[in-house]
Structures are given as structure tokens and as C-alpha cells.
């Protein structure tokens, strides 16, 4: 493409230069010729008044000398009154040409050795006609023509070279984005999902690059959604598994009870394996779309209805607050429900029976805050717990419950923090940003910006 564009520009520019330079060169040559003969006519005109007054040889010689062209001018007087014709100055034109001009009575030019001769007829008082001859050298006729042609040739060559250079740069500007697009497609085909193409170059190639990047993002998103779907579905199985484990623990002793507990433990291990495999090297999920959202108060109430039954079986006191009014959150309903199940499942898994817990929902001007707290022993190292939430599961915990919660919050520009609750145990605070903007890194203590809902206490 690049060389084709260069060849086209070379051919077009060459034709344009030839089309303009050749006529312009001929015009320059003709102008130089006209300039030389106009000068000769002015010299001849300086002698005409003297010929109209006298034909005396001496006086005419002085007039010719005063004209400054004595070496290139001649005056041809006709014969008459018994005297022969007189030629003043050096004759260069042939006798036939002089006779023709005298007979016809109009000016003419004749080629002579070394140039041209301008023959100008002049009517004398005696009725005869004299002829003034002015010599025009060839060098004067072509004076400046060679220089003008050289300038035209140089300008034409510069235009051709410049057009080739511009065409080459334009070709590079077109070829490079196309080549990057090809390389990006090859990398994506090889499985490099991070391959993207810079959106530069001509408009068409920018649109193609934008479409390619959108396609690549969609492919990555589809793969991520598949992984997340497998992981989330597997993790959501942890909720009924927790119920099964607790129920199996209450079966007492006996072969059937032991088999049930062993089966539940095996099922938990298999689910953990599926979760780890599905989320291995997963890409970061994107923020929720502008149209995503749910009523956080309704989701919290719904999930607490599920967990309250299990809490009553284990003798746990619980409290729910801030759900008396709708609270709009920019997250998908299923994602928020999964995050709540993960946190409440951790409460039941990692605290003793009878341990109280609470769920608080706060609606602020720029964020929705969900607090899940318990009266358990707490988390000795919150930083390590959050690290497990990023995939380094240990001590029998996958850490993926906190990972689900963290991804939910960070998708909106919020965050997750672990701390000590007022009940004496662990408090997990989910900060869901409403406007989707990243909060300042130094921001601390969001409670001042939050409007606390009227609490409804249930035990």
C-alpha cells in the first residue's frame, strides 16, 4: 500500500509538472525574444526622424552613432537623382530581404549569421523608401532563457521529490495502524487477551481499531463472566452446605451421621476446588453498567429471612437496621445477594453457636454502606484476611467470600474494610460508591457523610 501510494503520487506530480513547466518554458523563451526585438525597434525609431529631415551621409552617420548602436545598425538609402544607393553601417541582411521590405513597406525580420536582423522601412521626402537595419544577436534573443528553464526544472524536481516524501509519510501513517491491527489480531488469536490496538491513523483505521478493542474487551468480559459464573455458583453452594454441615453436626453419633458429615466435608472440598480453579488468574471485572442497580434494602431483608431461620436453630441473636426504606445501589441484585451470603456464611462458619450478629444498611449522599458485624472472637490480622480474599487462601479458608465482597465494592469505586465491631467481634464494612468515581486515597471515616436510617431491631 505504501509503495503504491508513492508511485501514484510520483506519476501524478510528474504529469502536473510537465503540463505546467513546458508551456511556461516556451512563454519565457517568447518573452525574451519579444524583449530583444522591442529594444531593436526602439533603436530603429531613434533614426527615423533624422531620415525624414535629411539623407546627408555625414549627418546620418552622426545620428547612428548617437543612437549607441553603430556596430549593430545599418541604414540603406535608395538610389535617386543620379546617385547610387548608399549603405551606412555594416550590412548583414541579404539584398533581397532589403528590397522586399522597401517594396512592401512594412517591417520584417530576417535570419542572419549569429542572430536576426530587424528591417524597418522609412518613407523619405523624395517619395522613396529607406530601410533601417538593426542587428539582434542570438545571445540577446535567448538572454535569461537558460536560467529560467533551470529554475523551472529545479522547482519541478523539488515538487516531485516533495510529493514522493509526503506520499511516503502518508503511506507510513496508513500502513503502521494497519500493521498494528494485524499484529493485535494475531496476538488475540494466540490467546493473549490483553492485546489492544492504539486508535490512531486515518478515520477508517481508527474506527477499525476501536471496533477491534471493543471486540477484545467483549471476549475478555465473556471469558471472565464464564469464570465468575462458575465460581459464584460454586460459592453460593457454600450457603446450603453450611446449613447441611450444621444440621449434620446435630445428628449425634452413629455410622449414618458420620457418613453424612464425611459426605458434606467431601462436597465442601470439591466446591472449594471448583472455586479456586474457576478463579485462577481471572481478569478484573468491570464496573457495573450504568443501567445496573437494585434495592439494597429489599435484598438485605430477603437474605436475612433465609439466615434468620438458621440463626434461631443455633440460638443466635441478630439485629437488622436501615431497611425500612428503599435504598438504591448501583450493583446487580444477584451480586449483592452473593456478597451478603458470603459474609453471613462466614459468620456461621467461623463463630460459635449462640454468637450474635447484626446487619446495618446506611444510605449516604454519595455511597451506600453495608455493615455486617458479629460478637465472635474477631479477626486477629485483618490485612492477612484481605490478602486471602485476593486469592491466597490458607488455614482451611478459600478467602473467596471476601473476594466476592471486594470485587462488588471496587466495581463501583468503593472498598471493603475489616475492623472491630461494637459487638466485640468482626465488622465488615462494604462501601458502595453511588457516582462510580474513585474516592480519594486519604479519605477516612465515612460515618460523617452517612445518614443513618431508623433502626428496626429484631431478636
Image (cartoon, grey):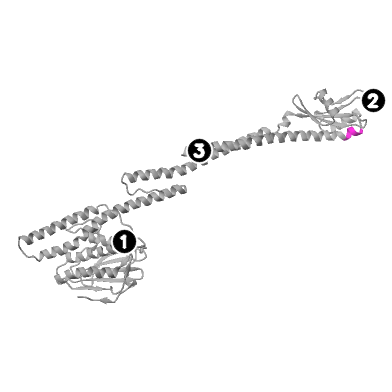
How would you rate the neighbour count of disc 2 (Cα within 10 Å): few for under 14, some for 14-19, many for 20 or more? few
The image shows residue 377, relative to residue 217, as above or below, that is: below
Q: Position of residue 443 (x, y in %)?
A: 34, 66
**261 vs 56, nearest the viewer:** 261
Q: Position of residue 118 (x, y in %)?
A: 79, 30
Confirm or deny contact between disc 1 and disc 2 (CB under 8 A). Answer: no
Magenta stretch: residue 51 in it?
Answer: yes
- Residue under circle 1? 410
Q: Earlier in the sequence, mark 1 or mark 2?
A: 2
The magenta region covers 49-53
Q: Secondary structure at mark 1?
A: helix
The disc label shown at residue 63, or none: none
- Residue under circle 3? 6
Q: Secondary structure at mark 3?
A: helix
Front: mark 3 or 1: 3
Residues at marks 3 and 1, CA–CA distance in whole angstroms: 52 Å
Q: Secondary structure at mark 2?
A: loop
Magenta stretch: residue 174 in it?
Answer: no
Q: Earlier in the sequence, mark 2 or mark 3?
A: 3
Confirm or deny contact between disc 2 and disc 3 (CB under 8 A). Answer: no
Which corner quadrant of the image does residue 290 belong to? Answer: bottom left
Residues at marks 1 and 2, CA–CA distance in whole angstroms: 125 Å
The disc label shown at residue 81, or none: 2
User: Where does the C terminus fall, quadrant-wise?
Assistant: bottom left
Residues at marks 2 and 3, CA–CA distance in whole angstroms: 79 Å
Q: Is residue 353 left or right of residue 429?
A: left
The image shows residue 376, relative to residue 63, as above or below, that is: below
Q: Which residue sits at x=76%, y=28%?
A: 116
Confirm or deny contact between disc 3 and disc 1 (CB under 8 A). Answer: no
The image shows residue 277, relative to residue 238, as above or below, that is: above
Q: Which residue sits at x=89%, y=34%?
A: 50
Amino acid at each position: 500500500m505504501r509503495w503504491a501510494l508513492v508511485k501514484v503520487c510520483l506519476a501524478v506530480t510528474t504529469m502536473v509538472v510537465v503540463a505546467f513547466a513546458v508551456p511556461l518554458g516556451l512563454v519565457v523563451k517568447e518573452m525574451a525574444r519579444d524583449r530583444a526585438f522591442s529594444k531593436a525597434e526602439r533603436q530603429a525609431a531613434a533614426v527615423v526622424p533624422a531620415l525624414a529631415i535629411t539623407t546627408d551621409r555625414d549627418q546620418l552617420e552622426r545620428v547612428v552613432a548617437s543612437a549607441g548602436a553603430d556596430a549593430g545598425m545599418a541604414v540603406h538609402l535608395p538610389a535617386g537623382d543620379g546617385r547610387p544607393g548608399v549603405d551606412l553601417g555594416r550590412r548583414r541582411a541579404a539584398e533581397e530581404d532589403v528590397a522586399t521590405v522597401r517594396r512592401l513597406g512594412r517591417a520584417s525580420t530576417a535570419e542572419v549569421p549569429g542572430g536576426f536582423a530587424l528591417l524597418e522601412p522609412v518613407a523619405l521626402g523624395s517619395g522613396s523608401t529607406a530601410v533601417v537595419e538593426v542587428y539582434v544577436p542570438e545571445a540577446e534573443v535567448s538572454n535569461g532563457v537558460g536560467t529560467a528553464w533551470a529554475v523551472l526544472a529545479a522547482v519541478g524536481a523539488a515538487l516531485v521529490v516533495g510529493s514522493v516524501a509526503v506520499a511516503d509519510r502518508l503511506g507510513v501513517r496508513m500502513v503502521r495502524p494497519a500493521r498494528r491491527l494485524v499484529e493485535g489480531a494475531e496476538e488475540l488469536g494466540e490467546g493473549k487477551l490483553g492485546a489492544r490496538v492504539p486508535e490512531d491513523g486515518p478515520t477508517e483505521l481508527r474506527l477499525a481499531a476501536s471496533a477491534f478493542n471493543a471486540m477484545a474487551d467483549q471476549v475478555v468480559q465473556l471469558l471472565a463472566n464464564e469464570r465468575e459464573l462458575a465460581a459464584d455458583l460454586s460459592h453460593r453452594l457454600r450457603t446450603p452446605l453450611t446449613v447441611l454441615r450444621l444440621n449434620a453436626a446435630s445428628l449425634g453419633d452413629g455410622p449414618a451421621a458420620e457418613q453424612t458429615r464425611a459426605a458434606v466435608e467431601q462436597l465442601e472440598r470439591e466446591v472449594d476446588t471448583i472455586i479456586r480453579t474457576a478463579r485462577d488468574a481471572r481478569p478484573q471485572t468491570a464496573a457495573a453498567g450504568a443501567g445496573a442497580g437494585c434495592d439494597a434494602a429489599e435484598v438485605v431483608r430477603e437474605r436475612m429471612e433465609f439466615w434468620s431461620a438458621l440463626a434461631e436453630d443455633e440460638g443466635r441473636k441478630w439485629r437488622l437496621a436501615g431497611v425500612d426504606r428503599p435504598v438504591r445501589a448501583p450493583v446487580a441484585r444477584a451480586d449483592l445477594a452473593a456478597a451478603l451470603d458470603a459474609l453471613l456464611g462466614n459468620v456461621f462458619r467461623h463463630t460459635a453457636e449462640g454468637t450474635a450478629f447484626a446487619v446495618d444498611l446506611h444510605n449516604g449522599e454519595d455511597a451506600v454502606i453495608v455493615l455486617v458485624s458479629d460478637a465472635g472472637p474477631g479477626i486477629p490480622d485483618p490485612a492477612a484476611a484481605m490478602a486471602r480474599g485476593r486469592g491466597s487462601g490458607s488455614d482451611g479458608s478459600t478467602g473467596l467470600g471476601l473476594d466476592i465482597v471486594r470485587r462488588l465494592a471496587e466495581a463501583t469505586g468503593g472498598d471493603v474494610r475489616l475492623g472491630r465491631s461494637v459487638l466485640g467481634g468482626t465488622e465488615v464494612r462494604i462501601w458502595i460508591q453511588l457516582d462510580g468515581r474513585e474516592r480519594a486515597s486519604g479519605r477516612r471515616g465515612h460515618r460523617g457523610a452517612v445518614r443513618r436510617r431508623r433502626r428496626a431491631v429484631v431478636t
